[in-house]
Amino acid sequence: MTEAILPDLGTQVLIPVCALVGILFALFQYAVVSKVKVSVDKSDSAGKNGASEYLIEEEEGLNDHSVVAKCAEIQSAISEGAESFLFTEYRYVGVFMAAFAVLIFLFLGSVEGFSTSHQTCTYDKTKMCKPALATAVASTISFLLGAFTSVFSGYFGMKIATFANARTTLEARKGVGKAFIVAFRSGAVMGFLLAANGLLVLWVTINVFKLYYGDDWEGLFEAITGYGLGGSSMALFGRVGGGIYTKAADVGADLVGKVERNIPEDDPRNPAVIADNVGDNVGDIAGMGSDLFGSYAESSCAALVVASISSFGVNHDFTAMLYPLLISSVGILVCLLTTLFATDFFEIKVVAQIEPALKRQLVISTVLMTIGIALISWLALPPSFTIFNFGTQKVVKNWQLFLCVGVGLWAGLIIGFVTEYYTSNAYSPVQDVADSCRTGAATNVIFGLALGYKSVIIPIFSIAIAIFVSFSFAAMYGIAVAALGMLSTIATGLAIDAYGPISDNAGGIAEMAGMSHRIRERTDALDAAGNTTAAIGKGFAIGSAALVSLALFGAFVSRATITTVDVLTPKVFIGLIVGAMLPYWFSAMTMKSVGSAALKMVEEVRRQFNDIPGIMEGTAKPDYATCVKISTDASIKEMIPPGALVMLTPLIVGIFFGVETLSGVLAGSLVSGVQVAISASNTGGAWDNAKKYIEAGATDHARTLGPKGSDPHKAAVIGDTIGDPLKDTSGPSLNILIKLMAVESLVFAPFFATHGGLLFKIFK
């Protein structure tokens, strides 16, 4: 086997340099956004920022300082609410993570009775590997590192979003293009920080562990899997807790404010309006950031584990071994160049250009990344090598691995565009859902559910083709790098995804600050495009989760020394059918949690409208703090049962039923979870944009269904309200369920293989 062109030293330089470039680019974007002021500067009354003259022209003489001060006040309230929730959530989850870290150490350490003696390697019986106790310690450390990095990603994503929302509102006075650039740059800060930090921490962890493990790469990369487990564990609670928070507030605000009281969305008279805007940040920003970081960490870990027992690991080919990290490194550079197309090379001048500009980001990044993957595959991989394939070594060419990554990359783009087709109100599926509102909420719900089910077809075929091609070329390693291909443009994907909630908040602030209808139209246009891109982001997350889970499943089967998984075996089949049920159980728990929290919110909003005189007249201020507290308390309480279901299932099944049954559970949850997640996310997204289609009244057809407050509009609001927990709580959380159970099973595989299956041993 010949060596790669890129030397090990080049790899050791390229990866951290790309990560640092990503961090510096994020800081640069932050600096540009921060130039938009949200504090009142008395010396600036002449309007040296160019704000006053725009304001006089478009706000009909409204005082500049009062608007800026009002925006700053609202931004501060949203930021404080989001920060308070995250600190409360992280305090509770931190205790859980500490307990789970102890569990990892005890379970993995007990595999060899906490022995400090070297052990025979799993895949090469002629060599001695580091003791199981060392792997227990290293896995625990990498688990905590992954959890901390996930928290960091979510928290700083939330901070930049709350930093940018009022700035986007203020820039909307100058034109839709200015507001778009602020929102997109802010999303890019989150995207590049998350991608670069995840890469840098993983690279540092590998190099530090390498100092101890030396030539025992099997043990080294097995210990690294804890990094993915930590990232996904935090993502689960972030997604579920944040999703419950945001949807409780959203449902309460919509049902009482828009349907019962016939006041606009984000009207300052609505007591739940601040909680609703806080929810956009803790659910759609912090939760989503943790989720995609978890996908990146797990796909990297799955690829590294399989590669460590292939020729890369056996021959200690460091550059080829770190091929997954090199893909991510090139991805940062590609996304950096792609971002310039949105912020510098082209200018948004009219509303109609917003959505094409965002879609162009996906296409440009995919095309450029294809070239980048080809280049890094040629430089970092030997022309021929072997990949572990369930007990045998499969010979693979470097061009075949390039195709594996490429098929994942392009499958992601296809899933993104299909998601857009089914959730954007520019196309017939959503317009048909909007049209069904003419006959009431029932037909709206029926059409929306049908749309969601139908939207599953093409993404599943795309995933199936990606799996077939990548497995045919490079077995489970091919699937792992295909998942990395789908996530290689994560910085751009996150920038587009984070743009949505930032724009949504900007519209809310414009409404609450009493800005003109013209400004609100601009923020609504930004928000409508953001809804579609958020749905695209969820499509990417679910598609990559399917590939990541399958790759982790393959690594688990290999690590647990299972030669075949026979579904006709009773042990496996009972796991398969139970695993297929788990996404439904999980969805039931999360949706009921949203319903319970929303019930309390609706009652409180109604109470305030009825008991506080002057709210509807605008002479009295609602009690926003009580609504924020209801959402916070409910989400913290309600996120624990679904989180426990996901975290405890692999442990219970592995300990009592063994690795064969657990393999069935993982396969079943993967197959049904992907379908339910796609349909739930797209149904909710379609209902949301059907409502916005009617509200915007941009076409003759839409105007026949409107205006706001009409019966079709009220039916659309009800559909949107039903879809809220589907698209922002249950759907996005399901992709974490299938990933987290798979990576947890992989981490605990040595323990399950040694001590698992207690019930079958007792009744044998």
Image: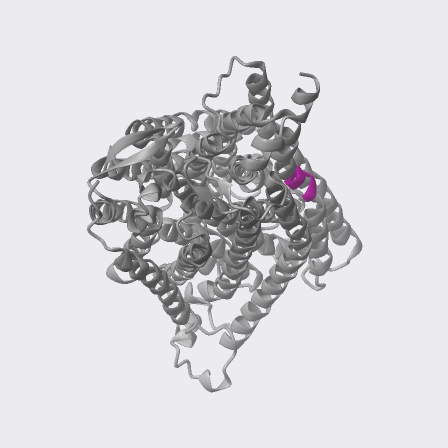
- Is residue 212 on the magenta stretch? no
Residue 20's place in the image compared with 235, above or below, is below
Residue drawn at (59%, 39%) of the image: 725
Residue 336's place in the image compared with 443, above or below, is below
**Where is residue 73 drawn, in percent x and y?**
59, 69
Q: Quadrant of residue 714?
A: top right
Q: Is residue 659 visible?
A: yes
- Is residue 642 on the magenta stretch? yes
Residue 379's place in the image compared with 617, above or below, is above
Q: How is the image coloured?
A: one colour
**Where is residue 658 drawn, in percent x and y?**
60, 26
Residue drawn at (24%, 60%) of the image: 345
Q: Nearer the viewer, residue 554 or 194?
A: 554
Is residue 488 toward the left or the right of residue 623 in the image?
left
Q: Nearer the viewer, residue 448 or 186?
A: 186
Q: Which residues are magenta?
A: 640-644
Residue at the right extreme of this rendering: 611
Q: Quadrant of residue 258?
A: top right
